[in-house]
Structure formats: C-alpha cells, structure tokens
Amino acid sequence: AAAAAHYEAALAATPGHTGLLNNLGLVLEKLGRMADAERRFEEAVALAPTGLQPLANLAQNLFQQGRPADALEYFDRLVARHPQLAAASIHGNRGICLSAVGRFADAANALERAMELDPTLVSLARQRGMMLGRQRKWVEAIDVLNGAAKQDPSDIFVAGTLAHARANIADWDDDGALERTRARLRDA
C-alpha cells in the first residue's frame, strides 16, 4: 500500500509517465485491485502502444481476471510487435486464451512455442495435449502427454487426459497409468 501511495505521488508530479503507470499497475495487482491495475496498464499502453511491458502486463491482467477474449487482443498485439519474445508464460497464456475463443489450432501452436521456451512446465504440456485432442490429433497428443506424465507422474489430470487420448485410437497399453490414476482418485 505504501508503494502504491508513492507511485501515485510520483504520477501526480510526473503525469503520463509510462514506467510509473506500469509499476503502479503491478503494485495494485499485488494488492488484489485488478480493475484498478487494468486501468493503469491501459493508460500506459495508450501512451506507449508498442511497449513490451505495458502490453504484457495488460494482457496478463485481463487473463488473470478470466477475460480471455479481451486478453487475447493484447497478447496478439504483443506477439506481433515483439516476435522474438521468449516468455513461456506469455505464449502459454495466449494459447489458453486462443482455446477459450475456439481457435484450437492456433492455441496448439502457441502452446508448442511456450513449451519450446520452457519444456519443464507440465501445465503447458497438459494444455497442449488437450488442444491436440480437440483437433483429434491423438498420436501427437499422446506424445505430449506422455512427456508431461514422465515429468509429473502424480498429475491426475494428465493421466486422465492421456487415457482419453489413448482410448480414441484404441491404444490400451498404458503401462498401468490408468490403474495408478484410479488408485490416486480412490485415495484422494
């Protein structure tokens, strides 16, 4: 709260300072004031429409508010203006937004890019496996989900999604994964 007050005072002395607006937005997010943060990020984007941080922060803020279509507008602008952006979270969240608006092929591509940037994130593999499944690309989905299952064998969602993908191509050789999933669900 003290940081927010300092940023507000600095903005009063230097109105329209993009960095101050952006940083105030970040502080307001930490305080749980998502709508106030959104307004500050919007002000920063209006002043610097191609600025990496304001665009990224506004997109992420809208994503966190559960507004995928709104967030996608800024994720798309961000990726178009900064094609070398190497942030797995940006590409991953963009992929989730693309999925939410029904653009499954684009979502799978965005999630693939995110996984290239950080192959250790099981959540990205989980999302990408789902996108591939929605496209009925079962073999590719199985490959992605197998990798996720190896990274986190306790992830019940991955195991269930993997079983679903395998069932769609009548692949019943799951090395006992389905039974382990049933056991984990019984124990939960």
Image (cartoon, grey):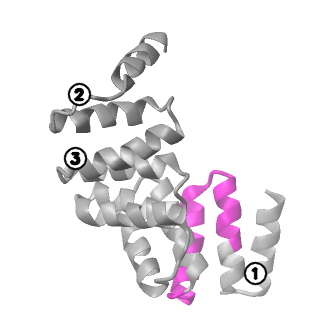
Q: CA distance from mark 2 to mark 1?
A: 65 Å
Q: Nearer the viewer, residue 20 or 120?
A: 120
Which numbered disc flags the more N-terminal residue, 1 or 3?
1
Using residue 97 as the reference point, say whether residue 33 is left or right of it. right
Q: Which mark is residue 12?
A: 1
Identify the residue under disc 3: 138
Q: CA gap, disc 2 to disc 3?
A: 13 Å
The mark nearer the N terminus, 2 or 1, is 1
The secondary structure that most of the magenta stretch takes on is helix
Q: Residue at x 22, y 47 (%)?
A: 138
Amino acid at the residue labelled 1:
Ala
Given the image, on which type of amino acid does mark 2 rest? Trp
Residue 98 at x, y = what percent? 31, 62
Q: Residue at position x 28%, y 52% from top?
A: 140
| Secondary structure category for the residue under label 3 | helix
In the rendering, which numbered label is found on residue 172?
A: 2
Relative side of 5 to 59, left or right: right
